[in-house]
Image (cartoon, grey):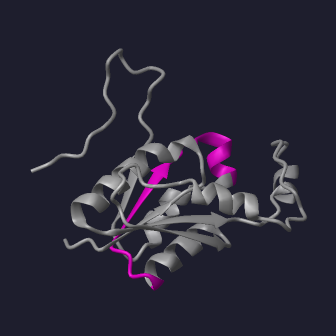
Amino acid sequence: MNIRSILFPTDFSHYNDAALEFASRLATESGAVLHIVHVDDLRDLNAAMADSGYPYVLPTEIEDRSDIRERLDQVVPSIADVRYRHHYVKGMPIAEIVKFAEREEVDLIVMASHGRTGLARLLMGSIAEGVLRQAPCPVLVVKQPATENAPAGAAAPQLAHD
C-alpha cells in the first residue's frame, strides 16, 4: 500500500497521544502528509442530556472559536520532519471526518479510541466506530496505553519494523 496522505482527527484529549505517535511514525516511514483535523461539534447537547440526568454543560451561544484554533495549532507530529497541515472543520464529527477523507483522498485514518462504556457510549456514541464503518479508506484505531495499572517498566506500544 502506497500511503501518501494520513488523517489524524483530534479532540485534544490525552487519548490521542498514542494515535498521534503512530500517525507521526507512519507518516515518516511512508513520506505521507499528515492532516491534523479537529471537528468542532457545535450542537447544543444540553437539551439532549437534560432528560438523562447526565451533567453536561455546553455554551449555547458560541461566537469566538479562536481558542479552539489555537489548541489545534499546538497539536504537532511527535517527529520533527513530518509534513503536516492543520484543518479546522465545523459539523458532526463522524460525517465531517469521512467527508474530509473522501475530499482529500486520504489513504489512511489513524485515530484514538476513548474506550467509553455504558451510559457515556450510549449517549455520545462511538466516533471511532462510526468512522470505521463509513470511511472510504482503512482506519487504524489506537487505544491509549494503560499506564496506571501497567507493570513497572512497561513500554509504550511500538510499531513493528521489517
Toward the top, the furthest residue is: 152
Residue at the image point whose x is 50% and y is 57% from the top: 128
116 falls in the magenta region: yes
Can you give x and y, in whole percent of width and height, for residue 9 in the image? 51, 61
Can you give x and y, in whole percent of width and height, for residue 102 in the image? 44, 82
Toward the bottom, the furthest residue is: 103
Can you give x and y, in whole percent of width and height, for residue 119 in the image? 68, 43
Q: Is residue 57 above or below residue 104?
A: above
Tell me the quarter of the image containing the N terminus. Answer: bottom left
28 falls in the magenta region: no
Front residue of 35/111: it is 35
Q: Is residue 115 left or right of residue 104?
A: right
Front residue of 71/136: it is 71
**Residue 27 found in image quarter:** bottom left
**Residue 74 found in image quarter:** bottom right
Q: Is residue 141 above or below residue 89?
A: above
Toward the front, the furthest residue is: 81
Q: Is residue 38 left or right of residue 157?
A: right
Residue at the image point whose x is 32% and y is 23% from the top: 154
Q: Is residue 101 left or right of residue 87?
A: left
Q: Which residues are magenta?
A: 103-123
Can you give x and y, in whole percent of width and height, for residue 39 in the image? 62, 66
